[in-house]
Amino acid sequence: MGDKMATVNLENVVKKYDDTQVVHSINLQIKDGEFLVLLGPSGCGKSTTLRMVAGLEEISGGTISIGEKIVNNIVAKDRGVAMVFQSYALYPHKTVRQNMEFGLKLSKTPRDEINRKVQETADILELGALLDRKPGALSGGQRQRVAMGRAMVRTPEVFLFDEPLSNLDAKLRAHMRLELQKLHQKLATTTIYVTHDQIEAMTLADRIVIMKDGHIEQIGTPQEVYYQPKSIFVASFIGTPAMNMLDMVVSKTAKETWLETAKIRIPLNADYAKKLENGQQMVVGIRPNECFISTDNKQSKGKNLLGTATIEIAELLGANALVGVVLDGKELFVEVSSKNIPARGSKISVSFNPEALHIFDKASGNSVV
């Protein structure tokens, strides 16, 4: 299995419903054997994009190619793709075996080949003991594996997954993420996976495509989109807990440049000075794990002091806790060890790692790097 592989290319792909454009001129090259995740909130166009690749939605403009072949006018069943849906879409009256072999029987595959492929796939997915059961007798995770098996037996060139884990509980989702990783390592089939869950995206993807309002905001590895977000949207969408965002203004003199609010002042190095205008409205992002608190009003060594604040809330997350403070009227969260959480109402100083600042132009939303 897994010998069929292909690149997938989308060039200027557009989708319109009447006068409403839902996907705007998408350009995307998916490598042979890559696991690519389309990530974004509801309504961003990610599932529509996947369905256009599958042939379940007509494209309104542009071209989609799989391998060397343009597939715009090729029907879904002849595109060499197999899709796994959120709803599993299993036949309730058929057994696991009958569900898995259904597509092969439709395509007139010889019976001995059907048996071999179903058995081989069932072994990979640990479904061998369940082949004679019906979907109603299976757990959610088992049903999802059957849906994946039905796609796998066709040995497609491309796997397409549309939010396949969203109907599962949290523990089972975590288990299925591991199973999907192992499966991809084993099969190495080109995979396009749609989700709104950033943890799924970060754990599964070779690259993530972050979408918003039918546009691609950023394409990168999980590390790139986390450490080098190109926009306020990406910075606020990626990362748990969410990034702190502060509205600040640029102030410049001949010798120095800094960002400020009424009570906060962040000095900037000369590289930023060249790129920023005096009075420019900015948004500064600092992740909670790059902020630090101290009860003695001294900044940590090598860190920049933001100011003093009062602890408003503390949220236990396990090994870590999230402490909420208000600084110059702005709510900030700091990640600390849960072993030593200061009491609510404590006065503390807040400092940050200056190398971990993300600075965005407020008007455009784009990063200033």
Image (tube, grey):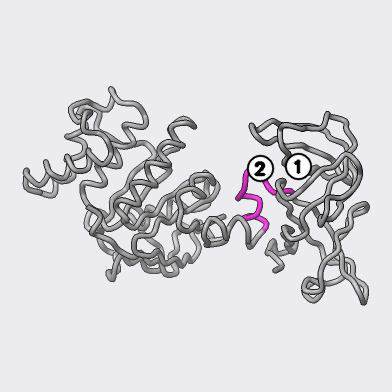
Label 1: which secondary element? strand
Magenta-span inclusion, residue 243? yes
Residue drawn at x 74%, y 58% is 357
Which callout, 2 or 1, points at the residue further toward the start of the chain? 2
In the picture of the structure, the residue carrying the numbered disc 1 is 333
Q: Position of residue 260 (x, y in %)?
A: 88, 58
- Foreground residue among 321 and 266: 321
Q: Position of residue 97 (x, y in %)?
A: 18, 34
Relative to 311, is 220 on the left or the right? Answer: left
**Cα–Cα gap, marks 2 and 1:** 9 Å
Q: Is residue 349 above or below residue 210?
A: above
Magenta-span inclusion, residue 322? no
**In the rendered structure, which segment of residues is drawn in magenta?**
232-244
- Label 2 amino acid? Pro
Residue 55 visible from this viewpoint:
no
Query: How would you rate the neighbour count of disc 2 (Cα within 10 Å): few for under 14, some for 14-19, many for 20 or more?
Result: some
Relative to 70, is 275 on the left or the right? Answer: right
Q: Is residue 305 above or below residue 66?
A: above
Query: Is the Cβ of the residue at disc 2 closer than 8 Å to that at disc 1?
Result: yes
Residue 164 visible from this viewpoint:
yes
Q: Position of residue 312 (x, y in %)?
A: 82, 33
Q: Which mark is residue 241?
A: 2
- The image quarter containing residue 8 is bottom left
- The image quarter containing residue 105 is top left
Residue drawn at x 43%, y 56% is 36
- Label 1 amino acid? Phe
Residue drawn at x 30%, y 69% is 70
Relative to 353, is 153 on the left or the right? Answer: left
Label 2: which secondary element? loop
Relative to 163, is 246 on the left or the right? Answer: right
Q: Position of residue 333 (x, y in %)?
A: 75, 42
Q: Which mark is residue 226?
A: none
